[in-house]
Amino acid sequence: MTTVTLAQVAGIAGVSTATVSMVLRNRGRISQATRERVLKALDESGYVYNQTAANLRNRSSNQVGLLLHDITNPFYGEMTAGLSHEMERHEMLLFLANSEESEERQQKFVDSLMRNNACGMVLCAARETPQAFFDGLKRRNIPAIMVVRPLNDPDFDFVGTDNFLGTQMATAHLLRLGHQHIAFIGGSLSSGTRSQRIGGYTSKLLENGISPNPDWIVTSQASQSDGARVAEMLFSQFPQITAAVCYQDIVALGVMQALRKMGREVGRDFALVGFDDITEAALVQPALTTVSVAAKEIGRKAGELLFSRIQGNDEPPKRIILPPALVIRESCGFRRG
Amino acid sequence: MTTVTLAQVAGIAGVSTATVSMVLRNRGRISQATRERVLKALDESGYVYNQTAANLRNRSSNQVGLLLHDITNPFYGEMTAGLSHEMERHEMLLFLANSEESEERQQKFVDSLMRNNACGMVLCAARETPQAFFDGLKRRNIPAIMVVRPLNDPDFDFVGTDNFLGTQMATAHLLRLGHQHIAFIGGSLSSGTRSQRIGGYTSKLLENGISPNPDWIVTSQASQSDGARVAEMLFSQFPQITAAVCYQDIVALGVMQALRKMGREVGRDFALVGFDDITEAALVQPALTTVSVAAKEIGRKAGELLFSRIQGNDEPPKRIILPPALVIRESCGFRRG
DNA sequence: TTGTATGCGTTATCAA
DNA sequence: TTGATAACGCATACAA
């Protein structure tokens, strides 16, 4: 399979490379006759456009990067689908990398993007990413959109959800149903997202004259099993708790498991709200009431914004905060006495 | 941010571009003195290697593509993580695209990969992909590994799981527990994966002197609700059925629902086995016995194989079939009378 | 409307 | 051990 070049096509069509190039990109004025001749030669030769050469010549590219910390998390799967769809619309290619929360892998990916002349990126940075990483990014002067994980640095565009409002809605829902003893379960101490979610939870409690009990706010890893473990400890120590707002759906699923094991029935003896609205939330029994954050939409919006930046949009950094929605299913049951 | 080139670095170091290039890639013999001088210049200048130019010059690239039909499916998320990890080990970049089962999007992605001079790809093709697509791929003569969805074309490498063995194991398990009336529920008629799974089921029945009953093999969409619908019809017509092998866990969950509604208790009156080992399988009550497929491992193996092909390995096409594992939980109960 | 010639940033071949 | 220089395949001034 020898590679066919513009020059060879030009040879076949009996024109110059400039002409072929112009036909290819619909630029300049080409007579109908030669255009057809070129098109024919293009077709016959089995020519494949060499984007690499064009990129080098143009000092540009049509490749963007997406850095995630955990692609196996269904939430990010959804988000990726949204971004991917948006990028395809603009004929751009998407590089994917999974940092697995490693700062080193993350840095390697970004360096690789730079070497490959990517024209932009969407990042959900690893948890303990040092500021130096972001400073480096700014120096590079390449469009970069941060997603999902809240970031202090005001110099970056950001697309995410309103975590604070989300848990406010969840907590309000539980309060409306008559619950007074509401726990908050999940997330890790160093998570900014978690801070915001706890903020929504505590503020709504206080609004209703309930002072939050620090013992009822517990951390957990992002897994079902750890959610179960943590919940079991919590509920055996504080049996008076009748409801919980969970940091994530995955954790909520674990909490469900623990409650069942302890002989308590979710939806009757206990009310549970999750966060994320992953697919499983609708599938478990009882179906999980949760806060939906439109992961796909985050991806789409990030893609849209990134594309506009690549096109040269130099407005000041934006923060796009998508409103969450409470999806009421069965895990909170009905109003209590 | 003006881009620094090799030539500029060479200028600073007072050497030629050839020398800088050699230092950069540790090729040729360079004296310690000049090497250090070049390294220093490289560092001071903030030089960024231009992979695009190198690729053009070398007629090569370090970019591979991954085509999926549904990245939001957690199974493919896992697989992607496995592949991504493997690619990173080899300093390769991974392009991702989501066909959403559209043949057109799929073709566009592959074309785009060709234009961008990708050096290989991993594909899980859309369901109704015409043979022409695969033929086109072969003509391109670019390493392509097929994954997960079984393919008839023997010219491609394939990595997937042993669907046949999986349902054999599931069926054998039910037979061991004393069941004689075993149904097969789920999957769509056009699915090759389903054919294999049905093969495992029927062959194991026959091995045990039971002739499969076509009426007990029913299709279903990949949703809980359709699984429930289909199961209800089946069981009300054939109440003698005491066990079922399901095409997918999602379907099995629906079957559970139907059984419950009909007053039959899974794990006591009925034995159920799923396929996939999705997260919910461990969660439902009773927990679902299922066939587990190592998605991450499929990704890893596909990456390994792809890399070897890129390196020039031209052995005949391989079929890597990873063994599934039966995960025994509670949905089959214990041995029957 | 079309052709000529040059450069994008590397690498590799040859000389020196 | 190092330097000059010609590709790699395309795009675009500029000339014709």
Image (tube, coloured by chain):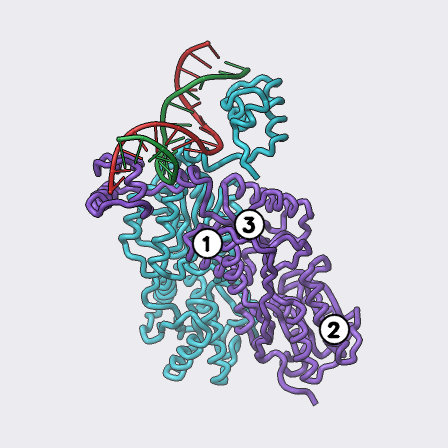
Chain colours: A purple, B cyan, C red, D green
Residue A50 rendering spot, x and y as whole percentages: 36, 40
Same chain? Circles 1 and 3: no
Classify mark 1: helix, strand or loop: loop
Does the image show residue B207? no
User: Which of A102 and B279 lies nearest the eye of the viewer?
Assistant: A102
Query: Which of marks 3 and 2 precedes in the sequence?
Result: 3
Q: Is residue B324 left or right of residue B238?
A: right
Is A170 situated above or below A96?
below
Classify mark 2: helix, strand or loop: helix
Q: Is residue C9 left or right of residue A192?
A: left
User: Which of A142 and B58 lies nearest the eye of the viewer?
Assistant: A142
Residue A300 rendering spot, x and y as whole percentages: 50, 61
Which three-letter amino acid code belongs to the residue tagged 3?
Pro
Which three-letter amino acid code belongs to the residue tagged 1?
Pro
> Which numbered disc covers residue A143?
3
Q: CA distance from mark 1 to mark 2?
A: 51 Å
Which three-letter amino acid code belongs to the residue tagged 2?
Ser
Location of the C terminus of chain A (image quadrant): bottom right
Disc 1 versus disc 2: nearer the observer: 2
User: Which of B49 and B71 lies nearest the eye of the viewer?
Assistant: B49
Does the image show residue B259? yes
Which chain is home to disc 2?
A
Q: Which residue is mark 2?
A: A203
Same chain? Circles 1 and 2: no
Is A316 situated above or below A286?
above
Q: CA distance from mark 1 to mark 3?
A: 44 Å
Location of the N terminus of chain A (image quadrant): top left
Report which quarter residue D8 is drawn in. Answer: top left
Disc 2 to disc 3: CB gap under 8 Å = no
How many numbered discs sit on the rendered protein?
A: 3
Q: Which residue is mark 1?
A: B323
